[in-house]
Amino acid sequence: MRICRFNKDRLGVIEDELVFDVTEALDVLTASRYPLPSFDPFIASLDKVREKINVLLPSAARFPLKDVQLLSPIANPGKLIAAPVNYTKHLEEARSDPAVHHNNKVEEIQRIGLFLKANSSMVGAGAGVAVRHPERRNDHEIELAVVIGKPGVGISRVDAWDYIAGYCIGLDMTVRGPEERSMRKSVDSYSVLGPWLVTADELPDPTSLNFQLKVNGEVKQSANTKDLLIGIPELIEFASSFYTLHPGDVIFTGTPEGVGPVQAGDRIEAEFDKIGRMEVAVRAA
């Protein structure tokens, strides 16, 4: 199933370039009081929501996909986890290009581990990217995003697949400079998630997905997830060895070579096999 959040927090299902409005399915969620949960309630109750969706779909109102604004399919992620330099060729380009490494030492992911991005940086494809610090280089980075479906800590790579709710396309935008990654990649709108959530049952094998990114129609990045240095189950094992994973947590799995600058007025097209395609407008902050 392909589930989106659109317009003013409506819940939708994508079929044949149409969005079916199934917002009523959210009624199955338990109401929350302060203090609010540290996980995403929608993802935590995804099975119940999907049962209600199946009841609603036959009579649901439908809209052309091109006429709706797509929001981030995950509204309340507990944390955004990111894997740096997780493709060999990107590691090589990061080390060789001063505009990328900015005199920072670029270490292997196995040595430096993962990093966190601010939740406030997350937006959907329809919101676009608002470039901050335009005097500096602001780069695009396309990644497979993995959404965690249930809580777990100390998860083994053998069991990791059972903890995945689904997949999205991720854009891990970044401001180049001397600061730590977590600061330069946590700018508002610099974590784009979309265009929708593809549930894990619809994509049972994400280990060999072709994907590409274009800027203004020109291909800038093109790769396959089979080339990840640390694979999806290993990333889940790695992350959960340091902190508990919760429903709605998102893991950005890393970007391949070809990262490059964007500026206000550019248009990014990001596409993954078996997930879909999203267009993201770039504007000034």
Image: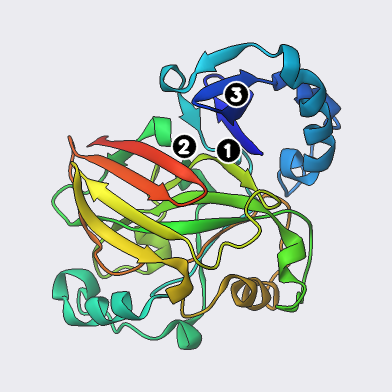
Q: Is residue 129 above or below residue 55?
A: below
**Quadrant in the picture for the C terminus:** top left
- Residue type highlighted by circle 3: Asp
Q: Residues within 10 Å of mark 3 (few under 14, many from 20)?
A: some
Seen at 61% across and 62% down, the residue is: 205
Provide the residue designation for mark 3.
9
Seen at 13% across and 51% down, the residue is: 135
Residue 73's disc number = 1
Q: Is residue 44 left or right of residue 123?
A: right
> Earlier along the polypeptide chain: callout 3 or callout 2?
3
Task: Give the secondary structure at mark 3.
Answer: loop
Q: Are marks 1 and 2 in contact (CB under 8 Å)?
A: yes
Provide the residue designation for mark 2.
124
Q: CA distance from mark 3 to mark 1?
A: 10 Å
- The foreground one among 42 and 198 is 198
- Residue type highlighted by circle 1: Pro
Query: Where is residue 10 shown, x and y percent of the image?
Result: 62, 21
Query: Where is residue 91 shown, x and y percent of the image?
Result: 31, 79
Seen at 33% across and 55% down, the residue is: 212
Seen at 37% across and 85% down, the residue is: 107
Query: Where is residue 127 shown, x and y percent of the image?
Result: 40, 31
**Quadrant in the picture for the N terminus:** top right
Q: Quadrant of residue 178?
A: bottom left
